[in-house]
Amino acid sequence: METKNIMIAGVGGQGSLLASKLLGHLLLEQGFDVKVSEVHGMSQRGGSVVTYVRYGDKVASPIIDQGQADAIVSFELLEAARWLAFLKPGGRVVTNIQQIDPMPVITGAAQYPENLVEKMTAAGARVDTIDCLSLAEEAGNVKAVNLVLLGRLSHYFDFPETVWQEAIEACVPPKFLDVNKKAFALGQGA
Amino acid sequence: MRKLILGNAAVARGLYEAGCAAASSYPGTPSTEITEEAAKFPEIYCEWAPNEKVAMETAFGASLGGRRAFCAMKHVGLNVAADPLFTMSYTGVNAGLVIAVADDPAMHSSQNEQDSRHYAKAAKLPMLEPSDSQEALCFTKLAYELSEQFDTPVLLKMCTRVAHSQSIVELGERREPEAKPYVKTPAKYVMAPANAVRRHPVVEERLRKLAEWAETAEINRVEEGSDHSLGVITSSTSYQYVKEACGDRFPVLKLGMVWPLPEKRIRDFAAGVERLVVVEEGDSFLEIFCRGLGLALSGKDLFPLTGELSQNLVAGKLGLPVPDGKVLDETLPGRPPVMCAGCPHRGLFYTLQKLGCTVLGDIGCYTLGAMPPLSAMDMTLCMGASVSGLHGFNKALGKEAEGKTVAVIGDSTFVHSGMTGLANVAYNQSYSTVIILDNSITGMTGHQQNPTTGFNLRGDPAGKIDLEALCRAMGINRVRVVDPYDLSACQTAVKEELAAEEPSVIISRRPCALLKYVKHKPALVVDLDKCRGCKACMKIGCPAISLRDGKAVVDPTQCLGCGVCQQLCGFGALKEVE
């Protein structure tokens, strides 16, 4: 099988590491070779962060390069647009519609771009949007945005539901399990 | 058992399986998780040392005592530990000693992108360089064997993409070697000139033997290719990019040991290909060695000396097709890292900016104080340079500088390298104002304990340095503590200490807002009737505050209710929820 590439984009602190951990666990259990490349350290402090998840028969590079991502999964709208160049032609963008102003916008040095979904679509991406924050709130914790997003992403895989549930149980601390499972289900249903 | 783990976790697993007994490190991205993961094995004594030099000497002591020992650091940490390193090369080891150093090409979280391979060459030590987690595990174990077989410390070089990428490893069992008896051997371990003179030839002979070993070592391997018009010499993550870009098309000499290098093996490989290309991140280290053998090749004439490589970059330079990506035809605003909402450093930096201070900075989260809108930093060099730099600045400029220049340094960084600078301030008497940003943790690297927090690496109660008492004992008479959430108190303290005609220390004390035990107030809300949209609250660069439709908006998912913005609002528009 040709290597598949998923990028997880977001703002430092949004929980993308749990999302990549869960995906990595799931793909390993499915018997794939897997590589997951993360960002630690300074960029985590509210900066633009991206995690690369690659799987297939044999994966060499730990990173995804321009024009190679089958999907960009984003916790934030501007971050989805930022990594668009990494998407394969016709690749899929699954993004939270939440907008978080970066510091240049807060200071007035720049404007938050408008109509990003339309612009990404016009550039050839198949864009799927979801309001993760509202659904996470509905699930009982605004921090469960990552599981809502994964729930939505699960539509694009052929794995049975039990595989996802097992991965959630393996990666989420027991005391947050209920909220996270609910968030995942809400993401699936959205 | 197969497991998907970080390269750093794989090194830790290698330590466990190799029977390592003691690890002493100082945290630094991208090396930190090695020691954190090693601490999860009760069989390995693990600690955070005050700095890398102390860590390396501690590890050396453990090796001397007869147990397999380890220390880890980031690339710039090896500069700090360079002093013991060069002479440990002369003494050699008793039990195995492995030193992991993690480079950060592209400077994801570093102040420079120096190439640590030069240290192996300069200190005449073997250096292994894994390219994924499985190799990180195996090479760590091999490093201990080499260390004991050749009586040498062994360097294990990581880089960000190997350290912070997860890949699959096969786990093995722990095999604990018998402790080596400690035998008094001054000729080997007392590096006074008379002994050191006899040890240097031993080092040279050892290096020759290691180079011989490298000729047949399995970790230096040739991977055959179908097309001999080109052959690649590479190592580390660059090897993975080459394989991704070229598959099995061209032959590859994959080097697992990057010092010393196998001369004959390289010559034989070169002889079998029409064109030789060296693919390496960082400096032209392998390239220069190969050129020294008289080989014609391409290297940094094709590839950059700066930043990281990638599969597309390698493919492009080797004349292979490169996939294209679409970009939006507008410039998107960047998203640089920022101080977190509720960060205790913010109030202090706002004060320094407001007072127009010249700020000599240091290494830590607070380096972010240099970013707009605070822009309150004039210099950042290395661990501890704020304090010693301030002393020099004040000595050069005198009163003019002393009245408006400060050093800012975190608690962990102060213990690492700031204390000696403060000793110089106290001893040679510059009227310097040093601000210790005490957030009770090593923040930037992800919350490691340090000698000022009162807890050790495992979170158990430990010795605790009393910063106030320490500064006084060093001869600083003016030592005061402020709460950085209190802007007027900060302003008073900074003004008074800058005016004082003697050295002073301000300890800006409040725990990092991300620490789990820190309790926060509810998020503030904006009274839209009162908000005039004047943006006064936005001067502090809090990521939780933005402007929508001409009014301030507080993001309830980020705001921790610290109240710093409230103190800037002239209209009482930022309110606590009743």
Image (cartoon, coloured by chain):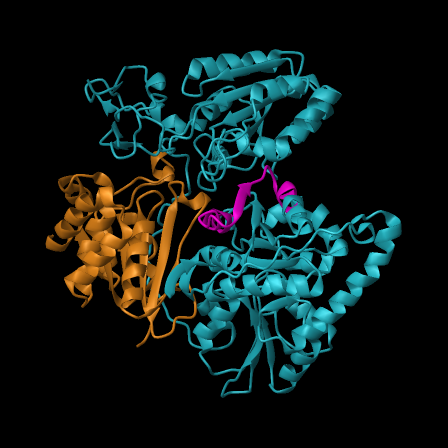
Considering every residue shown, the one lying at the far right of the view is B194
- Vertical arrangement, residue B499 with respect to residue B60, above or below: above
Magenta-colored stretch includes residue B228: no
Viewer-nearest residue: B377 or B386: B386
Is B187 displayed left or right of B561 in the figure?
A: right
**Residue B284 in sight:** no
Could one spot residue B506 in this view of the protein? Answer: yes
Task: Give the magenta range.
Answer: B32-56
Residue A123, placed above or below residue A114: below
Residue B34 part of the magenta-drawn span:
yes
Residue at 44% x, 21% y is B484
Number of marks in picture: 0
Say which quarter of the image contains residue B535. top left
In the image, B235 versus B89, the foreground residue is B89
Q: Colour of chain A?
A: orange
Q: Which lettered chain is shown in cyan?
A: B
